[in-house]
Amino acid sequence: QRSADQSNRLRNIAELSGKILTTEDSFALILNEISTLLDSPVVFINQLETQTGALVTYPRYVFGAALAEPIRQDIFSPGFEYSVVFSQTSFFSNSVLKDQRVLESYLDIARQMGINRAVIVPLIVGDRSLGELGVANRPDDLYTEADVELMEAVAAQIGATIERLQLYEASGANLSRRVQELDAISAVTNELTRTLDLDSVLERIREHSIRATRADGGTV
């Protein structure tokens, strides 16, 4: 019966994950399913942002714990190469605050979120690490290797979803950039039809080039 229930919940998680198409879509139902599957009142996703050098826990990716603002961990801090996200090795502990394997930045989060037991697994697509998936604070039984294996199965679905959202964000940013470039070309073309004053035209080119490329300044 337990195996059948786990299979059904894994199927539900896969279906719900497939419905997450944009960054505006909520993860609440997915996180709730994971909470029930792992009998864990706290569920969280830590997202790797290499461009900012941070592993970020966003409030929208947390279930069962109050988080007023994102928590950022510096991925270049000493020892972070041993973290789950970089080692790509799963971790569990039934005494997080006393476990000497736990990095200081994770201890800070554990204290902030009231975590005492946890399982954390990497979110991997291909050979790329996208972040971490964690559950915490099972009230009765201890976490075991069996929970790690179950979490890794869930992480395969969540990792694919995070990758899809990253592609969505990247395509949106590229589209916005392209629109700005076309607007700049159009504005300069209009300026050329209105005046033959070279200085005026060059200044408009400079202004729109800065805006389109998001630069701090420019010269012609």
Image (spheres, rainbow, N blue to C red):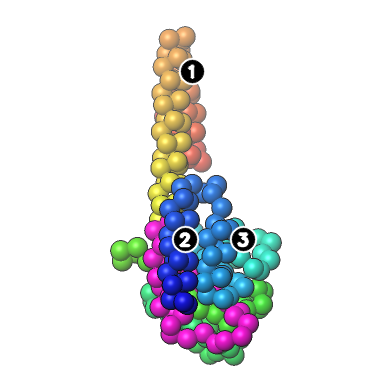
Q: Secondary structure at mark 1?
A: helix
Regarding residue 80, the answer to whether it shows in the image is no
Check if residue 143 falls in the magenta segment.
yes
Please name the residue that numbered disc 1 is placed on. Answer: 200
**Residue at x-position 69% and y-position 61%:** 68
The spot of residue 191 in percent (x, y) is: 46, 15
Question: Which is nearer the eye, 35 or 198?
Answer: 35
Residue at mark 3 to residue at mark 1: CA–CA distance: 49 Å
Q: Residues within 10 Å of mark 2 (few under 14, many from 20)?
A: some
The spot of residue 198 in percent (x, y) is: 43, 16
Question: Which is nearer the eye, 179 or 142?
Answer: 142
Question: Which is nearer the eye, 157 or 130?
Answer: 157
Q: Is residue 11 above or below residue 119?
A: above
Of discs 3 and 1, which sits in the foreground? 3
For residue 71, what is the image quadrant?
A: bottom right
- Between disc 3 and disc 1, whose residue precedes? 3
Please name the residue that numbered disc 2 is placed on. Answer: 12
Q: Secondary structure at mark 3?
A: strand
The spot of residue 165 in percent (x, y) is: 45, 51
Q: Could you tell me the amino acid type at mark 3?
A: Pro
Q: Could you tell me the amino acid type at mark 1?
A: Ser
CB of mark 3 within 8 Å of CB of mark 1? Answer: no
Please name the residue that numbered disc 3 is placed on. Answer: 59
Q: Which residues are magenta?
A: 133-161
Q: Is residue 91 above or below residue 68?
A: below
Query: Outermost residue toward the left?
Result: 126
**Residue 122's disc number:** none
